[in-house]
Image: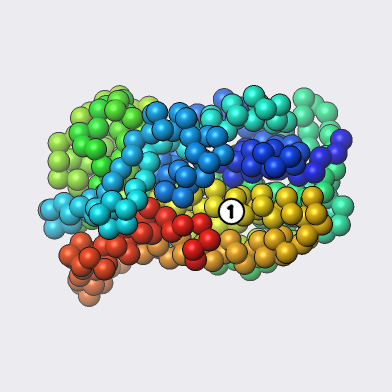
Amino acid sequence: MRTQVGIVGAGPAGLLLSHLLARQGIESVVLEARSREYVQQRVRAGVLEHPTVELLREVGLGARMDAEGLPHAGVSLRFEDADHRIDFAALTGRGIVVYGQQEVVKDLIAARLADGGDLRFEVSDLALDGVTDDPVISYTRNGQREELHCDVIAGCDGFHGVSRGAFSGETFDRKYPFAWLGILAEAAPIQDELVYANHANGFALYSMRSPEVTRLYLQVPPDTDAGTWSDARIWDELRLRLGTEINEGSLIEKSVTGMRSNVREPMRHGKLFLAGDAAHIVPPTGAKGMNLAIADVRILADALESYLRKGDETGIDGYSDTCLRRVWRAEHFSWWMTSMLHNFPDEDAFQRRIQLSQLRYTVSSTAAATSLAENYVGLPHGAI
Ligand code: RFL
Ligand code: PHB
């Protein structure tokens, strides 16, 4: 079996790449380890930055996002027992949309299938060969070993996939001495916008998914077992750190996520291109992970179209450097938000005062607030 682009992974990166290529008349096959149901239910990101929203609309994926997504014109930073609003609309003229990653994934799968797209779920033992000259992806499906010959491979299989290990490169890594305990609750949000709280007990984040569902996070030690946190303890701690009443409801999900910054350079080796979490991850504090994955595949789709249709290699040659400029901007922003908002276990009095000073400056200076706002709503694609 042969295709033009073999795509490993049906997350936002792989699915959107397949969609963008199809619109340009390029064929692809998406290979995914999990079931369709699993990837559609996986609870993850929730914030779409402005350029992501614009792109999804532009490529015919905006209908449900516009009907059900929640447009937000700002967020609040909470510290020293007070909320301070950062007004994105006033500072940048733009905003964000809160719309769950699994909803984006559902929309993408529906669009690809309606278009006759070739998505293969539940493949196992996937291996990449010949990535410098004659790429082949082999995998097992329905108990049979299959081979997919391709012109190029897009490794969109996330941080734990096979693609990032298929060639050597340089890795840049930072681990943080804490994790996030995340819950999704059947409870109406008590307010419209996100709150990022810096508290002596640790960071907390107030978010939501819909008028009926609240999404909340607590900073916890890195090795925390989610089972050791009872529902009552979670609600008490959220109320304390966020300094507000919260509507309680039954938990749909409760899990712990580690915090890490990691970049693999370069993002290309021969005919293998990495995109999204396969190439880089950020701590979730800046809400950038899915947005970066989307920015990567926008560049990759254009580069592959020029290469596969006209033999023009300019785009694929520049792919890694072009993406890495935006990647490192998001890496800095996510590290900065994480450093400013969390409680560091080994923090001394000097660091604490520096952190508080940064928070006070960010909410009181228009220049500093604008810097946060323009990064959060997302710099225009190609601007950096
Ligand atoms: P994904 O979504 O991980 O998809 C990779 C896919 O590849 C499959 N796969 C394989 N398939 C075949 N063979 C193999 N050997 C395979 N190995 C893996 C996997 O099953 C999977 O389906 O990567 P992609 O597409 O690059 O997308 C990246 C985003 O998922 C990620 O960056 C975001 O979820 C990060 N993130 C956030 N991003 C935002 O933009 N805004 C947010 O508000 C935000 N909040 C978050 C987040 C991530 C979180 N967690 C759980 C890590 C909040 C949290 C708590
Ligand atoms: C979410 O709603 O899941 C969310 C929002 C903002 C973040 C991270 C996660 O920074």
Q: Is residue 255 visible?
A: no
Q: Position of residue 310 (x, y in %)?
A: 80, 54
**The CB of the residue at mark 1 lies under 8 Å from ligand 1:** yes
Residue 89 or 200: which is nearer the viewer? 89
Q: Position of residue 230 (x, y in %)?
A: 29, 33
Image coloring type: rainbow
Ligand 2's image quarter is top left
- Image spot of residue 10 (x, y percent): 62, 37
Q: Position of residue 253 (x, y in %)?
A: 39, 31
Q: Is residue 158 above or below residue 254?
A: below
Disc 1: CA contacts within 10 A as few (<14), some (14-19) or many (>=20) = many
Which of 93 and 3 lies nearest the eye of the viewer? 93
Q: Quadrant of residue 283?
A: bottom left
- How many numbered marks appear? 1
On screen, residue 214 versus residue 309, left or right, reads: left
Q: Residue at x 15, y 36 (%)?
A: 245
Quadrant in the picture for the N terminus = top right
The residue identified by callout 1 is 296
Displayed quadrant of residue 132: bottom right
Is residue 191 in view from this perspective?
Answer: yes
Task: Say left or right for 361 vs 298.
Answer: left
Taking the image as shown, residue 167 lies to the left or right of residue 226, namely right
Tell me the residue at 41%/36% (across/down).
99
Q: What secondary structure is found at the residue carrying circle 1?
A: helix
What residue is drawn where x is 28% and y is 46%? 73
Q: Residue at x 44, y 33 (%)?
A: 65
Left/right of residue 119 with respect to residue 83 in the rendered view: right
Q: Quadrant of residue 210?
A: top left
Amino acid type for the residue under numbered disc 1: Asp
